[in-house]
């Protein structure tokens, strides 16, 4: 048998099976084959998955595994796997574990020596990134931002100088608040791509500096509806920007030394230009007068 032929379902194996994020044609033939043939399907929402299975004429036993019961039910599923059953893990849409349940079950399986077989397939974060037009060689997936403003702004401040492209999921009800906080914390020029309703009829991908994007969303209430991914350009310091550490060192040295000497020492410590630090200090003195 070559590697492209259909493999038999293995006993005592957990299959991690991605499902479509919108367009049902995105499901893979391998995913359908496994869903048809496993002993049990662990689903985030059995009703939702039931509709998917019905569409593809698949009859299967379903087991509810969601955020509120996963840690307890993972033991039940592990016991079934140890007894020789094969199980497929699915979420409501996309790849399980990516902001969906499944981590505790997969971890328990790995710890117990149960084979875990991952399938490639749909993922909203990667789908959005591939069309955003922002650097994709290095990126940072952050999931949903905190629901409350203080926590959200604290998280954004912690990521302010992150150079990698950032990926967030966001809900209809908090999109405007998140964009407002991004503008407040990062400034209006940080470039953000809003990818909405990916693979669905009303798919829309729009990018702009966050201040402009916020105004664009406010122009039409439909632009804040649906399932959304935010792709954010990473931080890029200006070429002549001085590292914050060098400015802190300069401020400390200025308390004990003349400006010229303080600037020279701070420049040597941090590998920056003395004249740039000197001009910065003079500008600060001018602002204080």
Image (cartoon, rainbow, N blue to C red):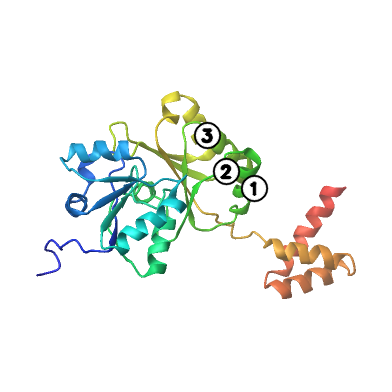
Mark 1, residue position? 154
Q: Looking at the picture, how far across and down is residue 22, in whole percent?
A: 29, 38
Q: CA distance from mark 3 to mark 2?
A: 10 Å
Ranked by sequence position, the earlier of labels 1 and 2 is 2
Q: In the image as oriented, which residue stretches furthest toward the top?
A: 220
Residue at position x 41%, y 51% in the image: 73
Residue at position x 13%, y 64% in the image: 4
Ranked by sequence position, the earlier of labels 3 and 1 is 1
Q: Which mark is residue 146?
A: 2
Left or right: residue 220 versus residue 242 is: left
Q: CA distance from mark 3 to mark 1?
A: 16 Å
Mark 3, residue position? 174
Inspect this view and state whether residue 23 appears.
no
Q: Secondary structure at mark 1?
A: helix
Residue at position x 39%, y 67% in the image: 110
Of badges 1 and 2, nearer the viewer stands 2
Q: In the image as oriented, which residue stretches furthest toward the right?
A: 256
Instruction: Verify CB contact (< 8 Å) between mark 1 and mark 2.
Output: yes
Q: Residues within 10 Å of mark 2 (few under 14, many from 20)?
A: some
Q: Quadrant of residue 49?
A: top left
Inspect this view and state whether residue 171 appears.
yes
Q: In the image as oriented, which residue stretches furthest toward the left?
A: 1
Q: Secondary structure at mark 3?
A: loop
């Amino acid at each position: 048998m070559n590697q492209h032929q259909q493999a038999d379902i293995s006993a005592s194996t957990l299959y991690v099976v991605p499902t479509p994020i919108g367009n049902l044609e995105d499901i893979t033939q391998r995913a359908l084959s496994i869903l048809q043939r496993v002993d049990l399907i662990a689903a985030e929402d059995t009703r939702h998955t039931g509709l998917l299975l019905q569409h593809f004429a698949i009859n299967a036993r379903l087991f509810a595994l969601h955020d509120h019961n996963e840690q307890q039910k993972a033991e039940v599923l592990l016991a079934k796997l140890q007894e020789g059953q094969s199980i497929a893990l699915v979420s409501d849409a996309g790849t399980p574990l990516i902001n969906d349940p499944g981590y505790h079950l997969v971890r328990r399986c790995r710890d117990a020596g149960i084979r875990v077989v991952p399938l490639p397939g749909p993922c909203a974060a990667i789908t959005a990134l591939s069309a955003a037009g922002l650097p994709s060689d290095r990126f940072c997936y952050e999931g949903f931002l905190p629901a409350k403003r203080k926590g959200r702004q604290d998280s954004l401040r912690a990521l302010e100088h992150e150079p990698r492209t950032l990926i967030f999921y966001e809900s209809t009800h908090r999109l405007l608040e998140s964009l407002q906080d991004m503008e407040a914390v990062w400034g209006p020029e940080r470039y953000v791509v809003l990818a909405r309703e990916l693979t669905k009829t009303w798919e829309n991908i729009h990018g702009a500096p966050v201040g402009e994007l916020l105004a664009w969303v406010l122009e039409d209430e439909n632009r804040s509806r649906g399932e959304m991914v935010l792709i954010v350009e990473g931080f890029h310091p200006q070429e002549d920007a001085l590292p914050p550490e060098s400015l802190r060192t300069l401020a400390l040295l200025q308390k004990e030394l003349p400006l010229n000497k303080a600037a020279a020492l701070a420049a040597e410590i941090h590998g920056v230009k003395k004249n740039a630090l000197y001009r910065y200090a003079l500008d600060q003195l001018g602002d204080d007068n």
